[in-house]
Image: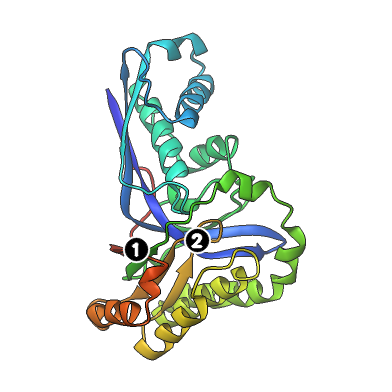
Amino acid sequence: MAEARCPASCGELIQGWILGGEKLVSCPVNWFSHVNVSDGMPSKHERPLMRQMLVNVLQHLGIAAEAAKGLRIDFDSSIPLAKGMASSTADIAATAQATARHFGVSLDENTLATLCVKLEPTDSTLFRQLTLFDHQTAATQRPNEWLPNIDILLLESPQRLNTADYHRRDRRQSLLEQAATLSQSWALFSQAMQDRDHHKLGEATTLSACANQQLLPKPRFDELLTIVRHSGIYGLNVAHSGSVVGLLFDAGRHDVEQLCWLLQQRRITDDYPQQHRLQLIHGGVR
């Protein structure tokens, strides 16, 4: 038996038309999809793309596809589905690495990225560092050394969105209309990484979230911006192809209880009935 796990993402730190095409930087958090691959009869409870990934890894390793019939995939995931939290990327990336480990091999990040984008648009959570990533082709991979010490209050909406369907929409014109804003967001993000500046990072993520309101609006967004300004937290980020919102703060500097009270007082919790306190962590398949 071999196992692997890959983290969820609280949406994206930034996403949009950057450097000539749509790219993103995921926001990895401490929820995981755990996958085990072992000898045995396939389970009826696998998620569909897991089995396809297993077969693709066998092909990559030069192993006959027939071998898949004798391999079992078991998994356990705490990641909500269809909310923009990279649940599918976590599943297939962990499946890929667990399958390779079952045969005594370890896949590097570039190989994982290539395998994943062959199946679907992929989040950059499979990279250890915060990485600007072309999530549809894997052609762009720009890592950043700094991992900010950031707490996240994740606001979970009951709304669900099929990410694959969303990416099939013709969004090019809308993305191009927001290209100037995303250029500014990317510049702020890059400067924040260089200066290790949490506030500048929050500006970058908030700007990207504002641009995304033109493509996939989030309920009560203006009120959330008001809370960000009045509370002094770093900023917010969103799932650009999902429904969750993240409030970015430092538990040592900001009052999270006050933040929760403000959400309740303004009845924003009506639209986001579940809140989860998470942390920004290193990405990568463990």
Q: Write down the quadrant of residue 148 in the picture.
A: bottom left
Residue type highlighted by circle 2: Ala
Number of numbered callouts drawn: 2
Q: Which mark is residue 202?
A: none
Write the residue at 48% across / 20% down: 58
Report which residue position mark 2 lands on. 239
Q: Marks 2 and 1: which is nearer the front?
A: 2
* Quarter of the figure that contains the N terminus: top left
Work out whether residue 131 or residue 172 is closer to the camera in this orientation and state it.
172
Crowding at dot 1, Cα within 10 Å, few <14 / some 14-19 / many 20+, comes out as some
Q: Secondary structure at mark 2?
A: loop
Q: Which mark is residue 280?
A: 1
Horizontal side of residue 271 vs 75, given as left or right: right
Work out whether residue 79 or residue 16 is closer to the camera in this orientation and state it.
79
- Does residue 64 appear in this view? no
Q: Is residue 63 above or below residue 178?
A: above
Between the residue at mark 2 and the residue at mark 1, the CA separation in whole angstroms equals 15 Å
